[in-house]
């Protein structure tokens, strides 16, 4: 069934948002997509790539009133860029204003906002590069309450909880989409590489692949294109009337996960490809010297289980992390 709706997308120039845009415009060509971007040059890139169903609005410092008014015109907002809580709350206010009468309980998803599983990292424990003995995979069905009650100082935690609280207070359905490590090349018109390009550059510059400690710390991963598909799948369910089985707010936290990969497996694969020899064990302090965020990127890991998407019938398609690491020139690891 063709979906006729209006979607506001924030982050179309980014790694994730660009891929979402590509997948959304191909899967639902009858959906009108408005992209809010910050750089004027992006208009040309987006217009050339998507001459049909995409409109681009440039505003490099949108006011809260502007965001609210923009969201008011949309059936669904996809946020793959804005991490500013007042800005996201303004989007929710706009959605609440336009959908108050039509969206009775159970709520339909109206905001899909990207987040990440770094809220699962227990900052009170030392980061060592080893998988903690008590570590277990987190389920987005069984552990939602715990995931949405993490201490606010953890990355993503405060924002996730503020967004859900504001959604509840305004009667808006929000879905938080949380991928782990992202593999593969993005499909957007602007940024097509992400954090994995950073590790690749770091080991090339050092001349050795490295792990912190024994490198057993493990992150769950998915491909950026599967992430794009998962967002489009949820958007499609949100936009087709009557599909109210998509959990929102306190039941609206969705991991997107394909597999698990330890830092050591990743380092060995990258080292083999670049012919860098034996993997080096480094300290947390050295990781921080290589990159100020090195300890968070390379000295810890959490495994997730995407049970909610599985219940809805969505499964990832790209299961070979090594192919994704090496595809299209592969300057990522
Ligand atoms: N990349 C990953 O590995 C990864 C993993 C897990 C979760 N995530 C989550 O996915 C989301 C997107 O990440 P990403 O890697 O795609 O980031 P990205 O490549 O930096 O893209 C973010 C985009 O959002 C735009 N943007 C940022 N703040 C904005 C604002 N206030 N208003 C309007 N546009 C704004 C940026 O605009 P400019 O082009 O003007 O800078 C950029 O195009 C984030 O929430 C991130 O936490 C990413």
Image: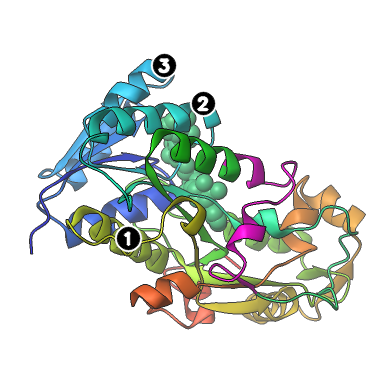
Q: Secondary structure at mark 3?
A: loop
The mark nearer the N terminus, 2 or 1, is 2
Res. 152 in view: yes
Q: Are marks 1 and 3 in contact (CB under 8 Å)?
A: no
Q: Is mark 1 within 8 Å of ligand 1?
A: no
- Between the C-alphas of marks 2 and 1, the distance is 24 Å
Residue under label 1, please give it: 234
Left or right: 68, with 7 as reference point: right
The location of residue 43, given as percent across then percent down, is 26, 32
The location of residue 260, given as percent across then percent down, is 62, 78
The mark nearer the N terminus, 2 or 3, is 3
Left or right: 322, with 312 as reference point: right
Seen at 78% across and 74% down, the residue is: 135
Residue under label 2, please give it: 86
Q: Which residues are magenta?
A: 138-159
Where residue 201 sits, quadrant-wise, is bottom right
The location of residue 10, given as percent across then percent down, is 37, 38
Q: Is 154 inside the magenta-drawn segment?
A: yes
Q: Nearer the viewer, mark 1 or mark 3?
A: 1
| 320 over 287 or under it: above or below | below
Q: Secondary structure at mark 2?
A: helix
| 109 over 270 or under it: above or below | above
Q: Nearer the viewer, residue 292 or 94?
A: 94
- Between the C-alphas of marks 1 and 3, the distance is 28 Å
Q: Is 104 inside the magenta-drawn segment?
A: no
Residue under label 3, please give it: 63
Badge 1 crowding class, 10 Å Cα cut-off, few under 14, some 14 to 19, many 20 or more, is some
The location of residue 301, given as percent across then percent down, is 72, 67
The mark nearer the N terminus, 1 or 3, is 3
Q: Nearer the viewer, residue 238 or 297?
A: 238
């Amino acid at each position: 069934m063709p979906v006729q709706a209006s979607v506001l997308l924030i982050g179309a120039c980014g790694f994730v948002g660009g891929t979402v845009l590509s997948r959304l415009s191909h899967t639902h060509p009858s959906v009108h997509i408005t992209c809010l971007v910050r750089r004027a040059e992006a208009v040309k890139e987006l217009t050339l790539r998507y001459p049909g169903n995409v409109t681009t609005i440039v505003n490099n410092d949108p006011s809260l009133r502007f965001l609210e008014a923009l969201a008011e015109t949309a059936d669904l907002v996809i946020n793959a860029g804005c991490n500013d809580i007042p800005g996201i709350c303004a989007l929710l206010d706009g959605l609440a204003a336009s959908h108050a009468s039509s969206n009775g309980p159970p709520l339909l998803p109206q905001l899909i906002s990207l987040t990440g599983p770094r809220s699962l990292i227990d900052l009170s424990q030392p980061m060592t590069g080893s998988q903690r003995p008590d570590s277990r995979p987190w389920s987005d069905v069984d552990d939602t309450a715990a995931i949405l009650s993490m201490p606010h100082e953890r990355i993503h935690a405060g924002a996730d909880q503020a967004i859900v609280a504001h959604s509840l207070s305004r009667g808006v359905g929000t879905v938080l989409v949380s991928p782990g490590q992202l593999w593969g090349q993005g499909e957007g018109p602007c940024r097509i590489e992400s954090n994995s390009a950073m590790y690749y550059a770091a080991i090339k510059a050092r001349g050795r692949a490295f792990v912190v400690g024994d490198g057993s710390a493990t992150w769950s991963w998915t491909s950026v294109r599967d992430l794009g598909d998962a967002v489009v799948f949820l958007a499609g369910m949100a936009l087709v009337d009557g599909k109210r089985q998509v959990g929102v707010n306190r039941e609206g936290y969705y991991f997107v996960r394909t597999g698990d990969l330890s830092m050591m497996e990743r380092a060995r694969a990258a080292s083999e490809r670049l012919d860098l020899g034996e993997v080096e064990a480094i300290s947390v302090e050295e990781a921080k010297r290589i990159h100020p965020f090195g300890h968070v990127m390379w000295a810890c890991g959490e495994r997730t289980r995407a049970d909610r998407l599985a219940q809805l019938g969505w499964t990832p398609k790209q299961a070979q992390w090594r192919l994704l690491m090496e595809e299209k020139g592969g300057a990522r690891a």
